[in-house]
Image (cartoon, rainbow, N blue to C red):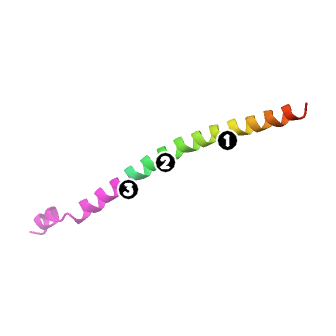
Amino acid sequence: MQFIRMLKNEEGATAIEYGLIAALIAVAAIGAMTSLGNNLKTTFNTTSGALANGVKNSTK
């Protein structure tokens, strides 16, 4: 009787599903932030290079 009641209990399964959803969201967020970080790094390096070249050109 207790075994059948345990099989019908879905609270544990719901908790696992929420955990899997949270993990999937975390993986997606990490991927998005990594991509955004790389794009920002490129933008700042380009801007820094342009500013450095502008300073070099203005001192000539």
Task: Look at the numbered disc 2 and give the secondary structure of its residue.
Answer: helix
CA distance for labels 2 and 1? 21 Å
Position of 40 with respect to 24 (left or right) is: right
Image coordinates for residue 55, horizontal then vertical, percent: 83, 37
Q: Amino acid at mark 3?
A: Ala
Position of 60 with respect to 54 (left or right) is: right
Q: Dot 2: few (<14), some (14–19), or many (≥20) neighbours within 10 Å?
A: few
Q: Amino acid at mark 1?
A: Phe
Going by the picture, which residue comes out furthest to the right?
A: 60
Q: Dot 3: few (<14), some (14–19), or many (≥20) neighbours within 10 Å?
A: few
Viewer-proximal residue among 17 and 39 = 39
Please give the range of residues in magenta.
1-23
Name the mark nearer the viewer: 2 or 1: 1
Residue 22, picture quadrant? bottom left
> Is residue 19 in the magenta section?
yes
Q: Which residue is mark 3?
A: 22
Image coordinates for residue 58, horizontal then vertical, percent: 86, 34
Q: Is the residue under label 3 in contact with that under label 1 (CB below 8 Å)?
A: no
Which residue lies at the image location 47% right of the left edge and 44% below the top edge?
Answer: 31
Image coordinates for residue 18, horizontal then vertical, percent: 31, 59
Task: Look at the numbered disc 3 and give the secondary structure of its residue.
Answer: helix
